[in-house]
Image: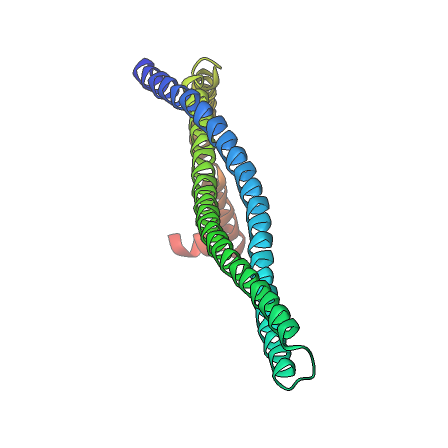
Amino acid sequence: MNIFRRLFKIGQAETNSAIDNMEDPIKMTEQGIRDMKEDLDKSLEALAQVKALAIRAKNDQEEYQDKAEEYQKKAIIILKKGHSKEMDTSEADRLAKEALVQKEAAEQQVERAKEESAKFDNNVAQLQKTIQTIKSNISNWENELKTLKARVKVSKATSSLNKQMAELDSTGTVSMLERMKEKVAQDEALAEAYGDIANASKSIDDEIDKAADTSKAKADDDLEKLKEQLGLNASKES
């Protein structure tokens, strides 16, 4: 029994050590998950802001493109009016020129908006990739955390079982069972002894009764008396 107790003690020590070593990784994993979720929130906020800028850049691009086209149309209308003498030719040239200048400025704004839109689209793609990576890491770490917690439960259960087994003899359970077995054996032997005594007493009484049995002798006497009454004995003798 001492050997088993030593083995259980060794197993218990190894299990406790495993639990101690697991506690820090669990805490570190939980903290890591919290940190990554904070990073995810920040990345989602940044993504929303950059997407807003990208939308704004696309809207600016469309707006300035419309302005450029509008200035082009106005320049054409003014030149036609100057050509048709609806307005002074020099004035028409001046205004048409100003319209073309505004058109060029709008086109420059279109190009600037295009560049910003492309830059913001690239930022959105990078942020989305980062967010996907963070989500994947969170999922992996949460699964790892579940595994670690499950291992801790198994280790604690094993430790508790080993402890119970190791302390089984010290609690007196085995000794108590041995004493109970011994008492039952004694009771069984005592019952068997009483049975032998009872059987022995019965045998002696049977022998005495058999030896003292006079029923056969009495039957013989009764037979002779009956024969005498019937006169059979006398006739037999004659």
* Residue 182 at x, y percent in the picture: 43, 19
Q: Quadrant of the C terminus?
A: bottom left
> From where the camera sits, is residue 201 visible?
no
Give whichever of 85, 141 is nearer the camera.
85
Coloring basis for residues: rainbow
Give the side of residue 185 with respect to residue 60, left or right.
Answer: left
Rendered residue at 43%/38% (across/down): 144
On the image, the x and y values in percent for residue 140 come to 43, 43
Q: Nearer the viewer, residue 27 or 126?
A: 126
Closer to us: 212 or 175: 175
Up the image or down, 172 lies above or below 114; here it is: above
Residue furthest to the right in view is 86
Residue 31: x and y in percent read: 51, 29
The residue positioned farthest toward the bottom in the image shown:
84
Quadrant location of the N terminus? top left
- Please count the marks in the image: 0
Task: State the image quarter where residue 103 is shown.
Answer: bottom right
**In front of the other: 86 or 156:** 86
Q: Is residue 105 above or below residue 99?
A: above
- Against 20, residue 59 (above or below) is below
Q: Measuring from the top left, give residue 16's x and y in whole percent.
A: 42, 20
Name the side, left or right, on which 98 lies relative to 146.
Answer: right
User: Would residue 87 be visible to someone looking at this image?
Assistant: yes
The answer to whether 230 appears left or right of 196 in the picture is right
The correct choice, above or below, for 176 with respect to 51 in the image is above
